Image (tube, rainbow, N blue to C red):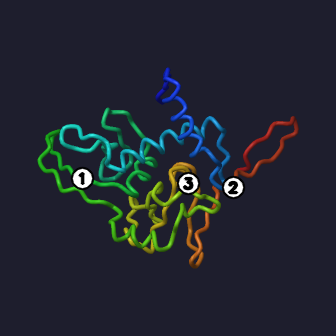
């Protein structure tokens, strides 16, 4: 985790507060985050949106971006600074990103392939024709603040086909990959299925245990 502690002038503080408040409303019936969690997620959305927009100054000839290193199996990964992240987070980031193939032998890089996006511009145009906001029920996050989600996880062999992609905001995309929710197509309607709740039974002395 990263902890931020900042002292800002009044103008900067009010600008940040106003920007955060525009992104902290609840996003549909599945959103049970606390106000503090919604503010933290809003700050992340703002930063990711700025990175994806490509408007920040270049560093070493490249636009600033979030880099993740992972294996072909995608079982684990790490950020560019070596911070480890889970395989489920790698799956979510792989849904809509630019990927580079790097071939290594005995810790030496022997080949670097060209970057390739998992969701191409033409496929995004098809998504825009079907959706105006995040596809999650009750979510009004605009399409420009979403990522293309593979209904069959890309890391599990799901094809990048416009008919099998849905736009999801950061919160709902994380619910699917890290929260155990499922997204299914019912005709032309997108349905979100929550993870199964464990069946509980009560023992004689009052404690609760999961059923076998």
From the image, tell me which residue sits under label 1: 100
Density class for disc 2 (Cα within 10 Å; few <14, some 14-19, many ≥20) is: few
Q: Residue at x 18, y 50 (%)?
A: 103
Q: In the drawing, does residue 186 fall left or right of residue 48?
A: right
Q: Quadrant of residue 41?
A: top right
Label 3 with label 2: CB-CB less than 8 Å:
no
Label 1 with label 3: CB-CB less than 8 Å:
no
Q: In the current view of this chain or complex, which residue is farthest to the front?
A: 11
Q: Position of residue 104 (x, y in %)?
A: 17, 46
Q: Secondary structure at mark 1?
A: loop
Q: Earlier in the sequence, mark 1 or mark 3?
A: 1
Density class for disc 1 (Cα within 10 Å; few <14, some 14-19, many ≥20) is: few
Q: For the residues carrying marks 1 and 2, which lies nearer the camera in this image?
A: 2
Measure the C-alpha gap from mark 1 to mark 2.
37 Å
Q: Is residue 93 above or below residue 161?
A: above
Which of the labelled discs sits on residue 172, or is there none?
A: 3
Q: Is residue 173 above or below residue 58?
A: below
Q: Residue at x 75, y 42 (%)?
A: 209
Measure the C-alpha gap from mark 3 to mark 2.
11 Å
Q: Secondary structure at mark 2?
A: loop
Number of disc labels: 3
From the image, tell me which residue sits under label 2: 29
Q: Residue at x 65, y 43 (%)?
A: 33
Q: Earlier in the sequence, mark 3 or mark 2?
A: 2
Q: Secondary structure at mark 3?
A: helix
Measure the C-alpha gap from mark 1 to mark 3.
26 Å
Q: Quadrant of residue 67?
A: top left
Q: Earlier in the sequence, mark 1 or mark 2?
A: 2
Q: Position of residue 183 (x, y in %)?
A: 56, 64
Q: In the drawing, does residue 208 fall left or right of residue 19?
A: right
Density class for disc 3 (Cα within 10 Å; few <14, some 14-19, many ≥20) is: many
Q: Quadrant of residue 150?
A: bottom left
């Amino acid at each position: 985790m990263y902890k931020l502690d900042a002292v800002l002038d009044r103008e900067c503080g009010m600008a940040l507060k106003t920007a955060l408040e525009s992104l902290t409303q609840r996003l549909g019936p599945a959103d049970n985050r606390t106000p503090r969690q919604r503010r933290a997620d809003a700050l992340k959305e703002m930063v990711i949106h700025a990175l994806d927009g490509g408007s920040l100054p270049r560093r070493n000839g490249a636009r600033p971006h979030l880099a993740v290193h992972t294996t072909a199996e995608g079982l684990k990964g790490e950020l560019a600074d070596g911070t480890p992240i889970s395989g489920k987070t790698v799956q979510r980031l792989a849904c809509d990103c630019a990927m580079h193939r790097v071939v290594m032998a005995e810790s030496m890089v022997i080949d670097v392939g060209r970057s390739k996006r998992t969701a191409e511009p033409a496929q995004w145009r098809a998504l825009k024709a079907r959706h105006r906001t995040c596809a999650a029920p009750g979510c009004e996050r605009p399409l420009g603040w979403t990522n293309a989600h593979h209904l069959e996880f890309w890391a599990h062999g799901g094809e990048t086909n416009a008919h099998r992609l849905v736009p999801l905001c950061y919160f709902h995309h994380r619910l699917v990959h890290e929260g155990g929710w499922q997204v299914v197509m019912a005709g032309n309607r997108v349905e979100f299925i929550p993870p199964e709740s464990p069946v509980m039974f009560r023992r004689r002395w009052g404690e609760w245990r999961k059923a076998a």
